[in-house]
């Protein structure tokens, strides 16, 4: 089957519009993690809105492997963008594992096929806290200590000459 030049132009145009409909249009930056502890960290990112007038959804992807796959919504999401400009967003991650390397990146999505992805960065949580809280003896441990004390006292009384 032979295609005419007009048919090829139409097919190419349709294919281009399909590919172009899912475009990375938001210039997105992933910033260095801050406030890193043994179990938490703060992420921030920014994006440039070229001229979109609807809400944008802001996320950070986080994980211990690269690319990270766990999606976390930023505190500012969804952001009602009304004008061109640079916008910032953050996420406070908690429940992290001590002394572990994490990978993360910022992500912006308008849910209409346009998005922005920042670079993947990494950080390592602080070392595990070895001192930790001191444990309080349980009731059964107190009973055992009391019995050992009583038996020890009785043993001393029995050994004592009269």
Image (cartoon, grey):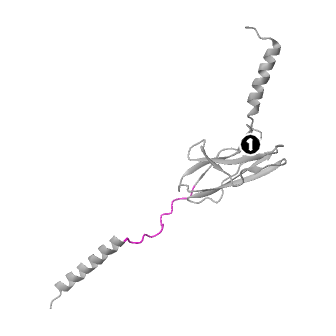
Q: Say if the magenta span includes residue 52.
A: no
Q: In which quarter of the image is the N terminus?
A: top right
Say which residue appears at 64% left-offset and 60% top-offset. Answer: 35
Image side of residue 84 versus residue 31, left or right: right
Residue 6, x across and y down, in percent? 83, 15
**Quadrant position of residue 25:** top right
**Structural crowding at the residue carrying mark 1, measured as other residues with C-alpha within 10 Å and reported as few (<14), some (14–19) or many (≥20):** some
**Quadrant of res 119:** top right
- Residue 31 at x, y = what percent? 70, 51
Residue 49 image position (x, y, % from top left):
80, 45
Q: Which secondary structure, mark 1? A: loop
Magenta residue span: 125-138
> As drawn, which residue projects farthest toward the bottom?
162
Q: Residue visible at 75% across and 51% down?
A: 79
| Residue 133 lies within the magenta run | yes
Name the image quarter holding residue 28: top right
The residue shown at (21%, 82%) is 154
Report the residue marked by disc 1. 110
């Amino acid at each position: 089957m032979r295609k005419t030049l007009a048919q090829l132009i139409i097919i190419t145009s349709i294919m281009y519009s399909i590919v172009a409909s899912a475009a990375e249009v938001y210039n997105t930056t992933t910033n260095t993690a801050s406030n890193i502890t043994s179990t938490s960290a703060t992420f921030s990112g920014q994006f440039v809105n070229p001229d979109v007038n609807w809400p944008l959804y802001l996320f950070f992807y986080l994980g211990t492997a690269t690319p990270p796959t766990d999606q976390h919504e930023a505190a500012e999401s969804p952001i009602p963008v009304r004008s061109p400009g640079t916008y910032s967003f953050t996420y406070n991650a908690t429940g992290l594992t001590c002394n572990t390397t994490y990978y993360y990146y910022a992500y912006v999505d308008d849910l209409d096929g346009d998005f922005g992805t920042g670079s993947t960065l990494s950080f390592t949580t602080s070392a595990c806290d070895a001192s930790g809280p001191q444990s309080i003896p349980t009731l059964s441990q107190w009973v055992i200590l009391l019995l050992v004390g009583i038996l020890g006292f009785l043993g001393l009384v029995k050994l004592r000459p009269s």
